[in-house]
């Protein structure tokens, strides 16, 4: 089943959990067991869909899975750390600022501020991170 079906709410929570289990957890796994480099971005997009639907708690969950996938990818990565990689760093900042916004919508201000600060620390030029930080 597609990520779009999950994100658009066309799949029940039980179906979604079953699909994740079949896929090997939070993201797709490569043949060597490492997380697919697409997984964090797909999870971020899924979180965005939840956010747009007003399902902020589900958005936080998706963004948290994306962050875990980024962390797992760095553990299995043989080259430069993913955070240091331009694409990995950009995804990290996007996920953190998006999760910060979702936390803010839920009224969880301390969590929102922590994510905004982490995003700003990762990319001081990110206007979104600076805005979220206040």
Image (cartoon, helix red, strand yellow):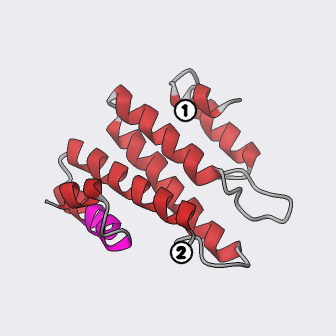
Task: Please tell me the numbered disc located at residue 45.
Answer: none
Q: CA distance from mark 1 to mark 2?
A: 35 Å
Q: Nearer the viewer, mark 1 or mark 2?
A: 2
Q: Residue at point 51% right, 38% down? A: 46
> Residue 68's spot in the image, x, y percent?
54, 62
**11 in relation to 57, above or below:** above
Could you classify mark 1 by the number of other residues whose Cα lies within 10 Å: few (under 14), some (14-19), or many (20 or more)?
few
> Residue 66's spot in the image, x, y percent?
52, 54
Q: Which residues are magenta?
A: 114-122
Residue denoted by label 1: 13
> Residue 123's spot in the image, x, y percent?
36, 68
Viewer-closest of 134 and 3: 134
Q: Residue at point 56% right, 20% down? A: 10
Viewer-closest of 109 and 38: 38
Q: Is residue 132 left or right of residue 39?
A: left
Q: Residue at point 45% right, 51% down? A: 63
Could you classify mark 2 by the number of other residues whose Cα lies within 10 Å: few (under 14), some (14-19), or many (20 or more)?
few
Q: Is residue 81 visible?
A: yes
**134 in relation to 28, above or below:** below
Residue 124 in which image quadrant: bottom left
Residue 85 in which image quadrant: bottom right
Q: Is residue 100 left or right of residue 34?
A: left
Q: Residue at point 49% right, 46% down? A: 44
Asked if residue 119 is among those painted magenta in the image, a careful observer would answer yes
Viewer-closest of 86 and 22: 86
Viewer-closest of 52 and 125: 125
Q: Main secondary structure of the magenta part?
A: helix
Quadrant where the C terminus is found in the figure: bottom left
Residue denoted by label 2: 84
Asked if residue 5 is among those painted magenta in the image, a careful observer would answer no
> Residue 38's spot in the image, x, y percent?
65, 50
């Amino acid at each position: 089943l597609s990520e779009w079906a999950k994100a658009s709410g066309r799949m029940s929570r039980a179906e979604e959990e079953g699909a994740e289990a079949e896929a090997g957890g939070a993201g797709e796994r490569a043949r060597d067991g490492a997380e697919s480099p697409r997984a964090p971005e797909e999870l971020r997009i899924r979180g965005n869909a939840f956010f747009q639907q007003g399902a902020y708690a589900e958005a936080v969950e998706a963004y948290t899975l994306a962050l875990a996938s980024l962390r797992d990818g760095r553990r299995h990565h043989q080259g430069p750390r993913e955070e240091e990689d331009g694409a990995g760093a950009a995804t990290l900042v996007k996920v953190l600022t998006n999760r910060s916004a979702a936390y803010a919508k839920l009224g969880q201000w301390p969590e929102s501020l922590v994510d905004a600060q982490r995003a700003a620390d990762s990319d001081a030029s990110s206007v979104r991170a600076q805005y979220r930080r206040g």
